[in-house]
Image (cartoon, rainbow, N blue to C red):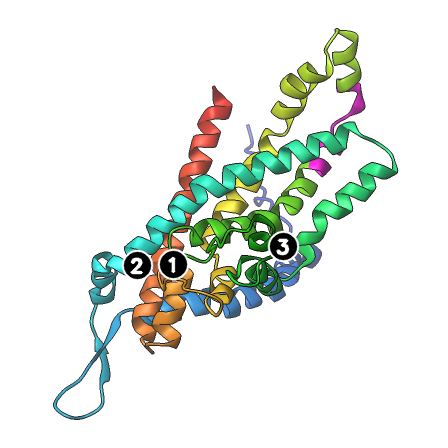
Amino acid sequence: MTALPRTAAATPPARPRAQQRQRFTPWLFLTPFLLAFLAFFLAPVGYAVYLSLFIKKRSGFGPAKDIFGGLTNYVRAFQDSDFLHSLLNILVFGVIQIPLMLVLATAVALILDAVQGSSSRFFRTVFYLPYTVPSVIAGLLWGYLYSKNLSPINQLTHHQTDFLGSQIILYSVGNIVTWTWTGYNMITLYAALQNVPGDIYEAARIDGASNWNLMRYVKLPLLRPTLTLTTIFSVIGTMQIFSEPFVLRALGYVPDNITPNTYLYLVVARDGNFSYGAALAILLALFTFLLSGFFLRYAAQGSDT
């Protein structure tokens, strides 16, 4: 019995160059975005973290020098009553203003969805117009309405209400933000309603659903993902409020610590403390991230139940 000759193991064919090029094609298209992301986001954040680790220290009669201080600026931030008070202000602001704004935006979106025709298009444009006004211009316009001596509101009511007083200035800023952003959120919610298939509404009406039941049990549940998205955007935007209180500072008494961004700007531009300002910016970004993550986790748990 003769043994069969042993054949050489078949070697896999070499991968074609076309497949290798196909692997790197997505990275080729992503390269411009990645370079811009690195240059305009990661690099500034990295530099801010690096800068926040230094403190100014004066030795003798010479000028102050930047020396490595580790976490000194961060420890100082948690002991800074002005910064902590600004965080408390923005939390109170968000708890009151964000739900009020989104309830108004949702109500207007539901009304415009129920009303069709040219009137719907007209009112969509009217409600969206405040968003097209720059925040600085909006602050100046409302600053005139808030002015104690020039306000037409005071002239009509014959009462000298100080809308820029320290007791209600935060609510005056909230009114400007609500006036500006309600229309933007309304358009987002209205677009979500327009994307709902009409068969769902038709099936609900065949089952005997009234307009109220249609809104409560069909439209509002379908708006939940969009409401979650708009809430996240509103939380992030609230933590970034700066233009409105900064413009009002020239028209009345506005505390330096009315919002974190206002206080941060004054620490850098007025006091010249760039290292401490960088530490405040990092802490504010982390606080915004944690707050948004907490809400997302809460929203996800609510949708599961």
- Which residue in the protein does label 3 denote? 23
Give the SS element for disc 1: helix
Contact (CB < 8 A) between labels 3 and 1?
no
Label 3 or label 1, whichever comes before in sequence order: 3
Give the SS element for disc 2: helix
The residue shown at (25%, 61%) is 77
Magenta region, residue range: 190-200
207 lies left or right of 158: right
| The stretch drawn in magenta includes residue 108 | no
Label 3 or label 2, whichever comes before in sequence order: 3
What crowding class fits label 3: few (fewer than 14 Cα within 10 Å), some (14-19), or many (20 or more)? few
The residue shown at (82%, 41%) is 121
Q: Which image quadrant is residue 85 in? A: bottom left
Q: Which of 62 and 49 is in front in this view?
A: 62
Question: In the rendered structure, which amino acid carries the disc numbered 2?
Answer: Phe
Q: Position of residue 284 (x, y in %)?
A: 37, 56
- Which residue in the protein does label 2 denote? 83
Q: Which image quadrant is residue 27 in? A: bottom right
Q: In this view, does 83 lie above or below 103?
A: below
Using the image, tell me which numbered label, if any, was put on residue 290.
none
- Which residue in the protein does label 1 denote? 260
What crowding class fits label 1: few (fewer than 14 Cα within 10 Å), some (14-19), or many (20 or more)? many
Q: Which residue lies furthest to the top in this view?
A: 207
The residue shown at (39%, 58%) is 258
